[in-house]
Amino acid sequence: MLRPDVLRRKEDFDRIYRKGRSVGDRYVVVFCLENRLGYNRITFLASKKVGNSVRRNRARRLMRESMRTTDVKVREGYDFIIIARNTINGKKCADVKKSIEAALRRLKVTEKKKVKD
């Protein structure tokens, strides 16, 4: 069974590239567009500019793990395409995580932290 939170259709990619907002950071470029669904859909890409298949797969694993462990709360109802830059090679997960968090904050899709009484 396919997971519903992963982007797959070409029409979705085209729509995000055409109408979405994008922010580049040191190791990633993030495209974002509202999807009017109750959940987020996300995909991780690494082009051949990143390197051979081993490097591309590592870049995707780093980005996936960074999103999984991030402390930033992302609002629901968005589609994300996260693309690795070739500067991601040889970096640690913590570096990639900071880069993705900074890009998400600049896209203004994060929720504010609640102040405890």
Image: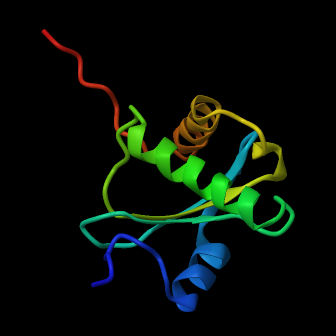
Q: Position of residue 91 (x, y in %)?
A: 72, 36
Left or right relative to 40: residue 94: right
Query: Measuring 39% from the left and 31% from the top, which residue is drawn there?
Result: 71
**Which quadrant of the figure contains the N terminus?**
bottom left
Answer with the quarter of the image where residue 76 lies. bottom left
**Which quadrant of the figure contains the C terminus?**
top left
- The total number of labels drawn is 0
Q: Position of residue 11 (x, y in %)?
A: 55, 90
Query: Measured along the vertical axis of the image, is residue 114 above or below residue 25?
Result: above
Query: Measured along the vertical axis of the image, is residue 117 above or below residue 29?
Result: above
Query: Measured along the vertical axis of the image, is residue 58 above or below residue 18?
Result: above
Q: Position of residue 74 (x, y in %)?
A: 37, 46
Query: Measuring 39% from the left and 72% from the top, which residue is drawn there?
Result: 35
Query: Measuring 75% from the left and 56% from the top, which residue is drawn there?
Result: 55
Q: Looking at this view, is 102 or 94 the one in front?
A: 94
Q: Position of residue 62 (x, y in %)?
A: 58, 47
Report the residue that reaches farthest toward the front. Answer: 54
Report the residue that reaches farthest toward the left. Answer: 117
Q: Looking at this view, is 40 or 63 the one in front?
A: 63
Which color scheme is applied? rainbow
Q: Looking at this view, is 64 or 54 the one in front?
A: 54
Left or right relative to 90: residue 1: left
Q: Looking at this view, is 80 or 50 the one in front?
A: 50
